[in-house]
Amino acid sequence: MTDLLSKFDPLIAEHAGLLSTGIRDPIGVVMETVLSPTEAIIKGKHTILLGTYNYMGMTFDPDVIAAGQAALRDFGAGTTGSRVLNGTYQTHKECEQALMDFYGMNHAMVFSTGYQANLGMVSTLAGKGDFIILDADSHASIYDGCKLSNADTVRFRHNDAADLEKRLKRLPADAGKLVVLEGVYSMLGDVAPLPELVAIAKAHCAMVLVDEAHGMGFFGEHGRGVYEEQGVADDVDFVVGTFSKSVGTVGGFCVSNHPKFEVLRFPCRPYTFTASLPPAVVACAATSIRKLMTAHDKRARLWEATRRLHGGLKARGFRLATETPESAIVSVLMPDQATTALMWSTLIELGVYVNMSRPPATPAGVFLLRCSICALHSDAQIDTVLGRFAQAAQMCGLALGEPVAA
Amino acid sequence: MTDRATVYARIIELIEPLNAKKVALTEATTFAGDMEMDSLTVMDLVASMEDEWDILIPLNMLPDLETIGQVADAVHGLVVKKG
């Protein structure tokens, strides 16, 4: 018998090699107690959370919790069914209405995760004979959506409008085309130049889908995302998003003004062939989304805390993936896997949790310590984090550059 | 018209800078097995071949292209089709 798992032997060896250096297991973190959106107990130690995507700190919002508790009591623990069978409750319709109100759009479809939203939308919109044109740095859920579709998939260089145009020009004029973009790219935390990219897509008669997973809540006047802030709302056909970041729970969605949008509920397999979200989850999401509409103070605070972290790391000589803070993700560039793992492990021992990222999840083979900031991080917490980053760098022998004035 | 030999020779030139393990490059050399090329490098190579001949090599075509010879056949076919 061939052991089907033997193909993972190199991965097992790599992981064991990493742990043999005495560092903590980066994929073995357990949050024993969650104290707030910014603090938890990990291995008995009080830890500042700086890698949760909980941008707006809605996970413990009292109104959100109350809505979830009421739905749990009134509608039960789960739906035990697909959205197209017995799995659509009043709570799901209210959640879709909250999305339509938040985005000012006519249609909304709620999926069980953000991954499934991209998987479902990309694979259902583009079929055999169509073309999907995606940014090279797209999230795995978009790549997997391409695989699930029977469309031809073409990649363009990250955020490169000229490269997108060159590739669109090679496509048959009359073929169906879907250009897939993201507002914020989550590895480096950089923002897309949507006006240029969307204009080129439209000039070549392509439909445009923008994933705003990391932009919802704090970009644009209504917090709709980068596409709103950059003023391209009229030319974006589909917006995909998630409840597991700013909204503070779990789930995914797509909103659109396309008049035929509702038909997608039937052919979309990742929507149909899975159970719908529990009523408590969609009730939490709906309440959170409605609060995010007017969360102007929190948005301002998130940017303030982000600038403080970005500027502070730069001032201490850390190399960052973006020259200025473009989103609420601040990625610190690391030289190699061993140093990244050691720095990550040292930070967690010092009571700071960040994300460790490596190829192939990262673009261009870079190693990163990724920080995502929360509107509820206090200046004191950010300053503590900055001090611990500097301390960890010293302990790990990480060479820092010349301090750069913030 | 670009013939297959010319296409093959140019593909070898495009692969050389990405051939980190300095494997001998032949028709039968495989990208994953022999060269141990990661998926990101493969996609960069695809982009450079697309630009070289002004063609489209959809990502969904890649699983069937394991050797340099297979890639040369596919690219040559696409160039001929383009006319």
Image (cartoon, coloured by chain):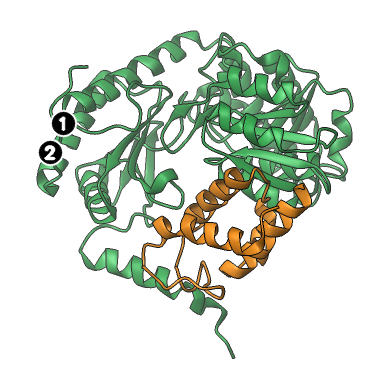
Taking the spot 16% from the left edge, 31% from the top edge, the residue there is A387
Judge left or right: residue A329 versus residue A345: right
- Residue under disc 2 on the same chain as residue under disc 1: yes
Chain rendered green: A
- Rendered image quadrant of residue A105: top right
Judge left or right: residue B49 versus residue A352: right
Taking the spot 86% from the left edge, 43% from the top edge, the residue there is A84
Image quarter (top left, top right, bottom left or bottom right) of the C terminus of chain A: top left
Residue A33 position in % (x across, y down) = 37, 44
Judging depth in this view, the residue of A243 and A322 nearest the camera is A322
What is the number of callouts on the image? 2
Residue position for label 2: A391
Judging depth in this view, the residue of B68 and A184 nearest the camera is B68
Give the chain letter at badge 2: A
Q: How busy is the neighbourhood of tag 1: few (under 14 within 10 Å), some, or many (20 plus)?
A: some
Please state which amino acid type lies under the numbered disc 2: Gln
Judging depth in this view, the residue of A60 and A177 nearest the camera is A177
The tint chain B carries is: orange
Judge left or right: residue B16 versus residue A47: right
Q: Is residue B31 above or below residue A337?
A: below
Q: Is residue A162 above or below residue B28?
A: above
Q: Secondary structure at mark 1?
A: helix
Q: Disc 2 and disc 1: Cα gap in Å?
A: 6 Å
Residue position for label 1: A387
Residue A185 position in % (x across, y down) = 49, 33
